[in-house]
Image (tube, helix red, strand yellow):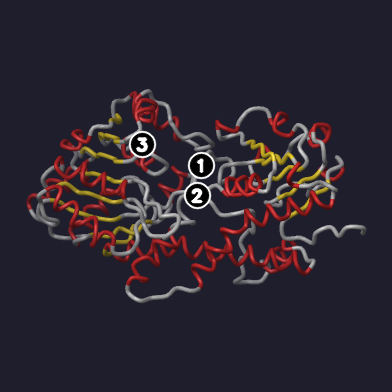
Amino acid sequence: MSLEVSSLTANLLDRIQTGSATIAVVGLGYVGLPVACSFASRGFEVIGLDVVDAKVASINEGRSPIEGQEPGLDELLGVAVRGGRLRATTDYAACRAADVVLIAVETPVDGESRLPRYSALRSALTGLGPRLRQGALVVIESTLAPRTMHDIVLPLLEKASGRSSGRGFHLAHCPERLTPRRLLRNLKTMPRVVGGMTPEAAALAMVLYRHIVDADLDPTDCLTAELVKTAENTYRDVQIAFANELALACEAIGGDVWKVRQFMNKLPGREILLPGAGVGGHCIPKDPWLLVAAAKDLGFSPQLIPTARAVNDRMPLHVAELTVAALERAGQSIGSARVAILGYAYLENSDDTRNSPSQALANRLRALGADVAIHDPYVPTYGGDIANVASLADCLVLMVAHDRYRDLDWPALRRLVRTPLLVDGRNLVDGDGVVTAAGFVRVALGTAQPVPGK
């Protein structure tokens, strides 16, 4: 993207192009940490900021605070820290030296109102403002409801810094497109929309991200960037909701959603996603609400999007219903049963527990009186020996498709459990009949359920 720039901006542009700019990254989670490491690997001096002391200490020791499988991240972080290219702090004063500031903090929605909660974003902006360098580029990577850049970020940063956008600083929005387990790969290979509050800001951000992104970078305005990011996750949420409702219909009718999906997806233009026990993570459960938040204030009344959210939110509760029914068929009451939940992260082979469907399931089962135990090999709170969790269980509920659950020793588990029931919420096991051969009665989501006496 070519654009004539002012003399002040020309100096910043040169520093970005040559890799001599200092970059501050605010928020060192699933987005901020791989971004910081990626820029450091390209020769930039990077300062990371976070409010969690333990996270900062871990990063400064060259240890990633992110558990689970994240190929390349530990190595990249270690090299960056040992080479003096990356350091972390809790002090915003470090931003005084930054030519570029990237903000990657959480932007959740309220559990009841479904409206955005921007406390972390506001805190980052007010902490940065008084320390913002003249002419610096500020990029918000967090996902935002449409119009947030114009209505909240711009006025708050101008007030906190005492400077104006376009003259005292440059402001852009480049929302991330990252998924746990593929953070570095996504960062490098996924296309990005680069929204500028001004064309000059977009041009600077384009040059910046070209250092670490090999895919398309599309310049646009901030509102379009906000809409694109929230709409793409909403689109996926609606697709998942269709798959889940199809699974529920197959259960009721007596069909098998997995066979139906297999045959439907042979037709060109059809790509039914995987149904499952729930949709978690930081993005998909909230981004649909971010998309419609501003529109609702302007009189728009969404129908499809809230319905899809309701379908997906209810899936863990449906798994609870399958569990109760399976126990009843085995002559067991949920109120006296021990249920072992396998998997607590929202995504397979990850430690990310944000909006975990397993939490919703556990809460429901406990409310019904069940004794609930949880295992997850990637979540420290629920790690350890699976045998301890499965011991004397009346039902195992498989909630996460971790690789480690694909090849469990089912005969050994059969000897440990009290009642051999398995509710498979991800259709993960028994393609080869090992589970049923071991003596378990398997109940799979989206399939015909056993009928008592038949």
> In the structure shown, which secondary structural element does the residue marked by tag 1 occupy?
loop
Along the line of sight, the residue nearer the viewer: 166 or 411:
411
Can you identify the residue that label 2 sits on?
281
Q: Position of residue 214 (x, y in %)?
A: 38, 50
Residue occupying image coordinates x 44% and y 58%: 112
Asked whether the residues under the numbered discs 3 and 2 touch, taking CB atoms below 8 Å apart as contact, a structural biologist would say no
Sequence-first tag of 3 and 2: 3
The vertical placement of 375 against 152, above or below, is above
Can you identify the residue that label 3 sits on?
37
Can you identify the residue that label 1 sits on?
352
Residue occupying image coordinates x 37% and y 65%: 293
> In the structure shown, which secondary structural element does the residue marked by tag 2 occupy?
loop
The vertical placement of 175 against 358, above or below, is below
Give the tally of numbered discs. Answer: 3
Task: Tell us which disc is closer to us: 1 or 3.
Answer: 1
Sequence-first tag of 1 and 3: 3
Asked whether the residues under the numbered discs 1 and 3 touch, taking CB atoms below 8 Å apart as contact, a structural biologist would say no
Alpha carbon of mark 1 to alpha carbon of mark 2: how far? 7 Å
Name which residue type carries label 1: Asp
Sequence-first tag of 1 and 2: 2
**Callout 1 environment at 10 Å: few (<14), some (14 to 19), or many (20+)?**
many
Q: Position of residue 331 (x, y in %)?
A: 85, 48
Quadrant of image for the N terminus? bottom left
In the picture, measured across the screen, residue 287 lies left or right of residue 145, that is right
The vertical placement of 98 against 197, above or below, is above
Along the line of sight, the residue nearer the viewer: 239 or 100:
239
> In the structure shown, which secondary structural element does the residue marked by tag 3 occupy?
helix
Task: Tell us which disc is closer to us: 3 or 2.
Answer: 2
Name which residue type carries label 3: Cys
Residue occupying image coordinates x 79% and y 37%: 410
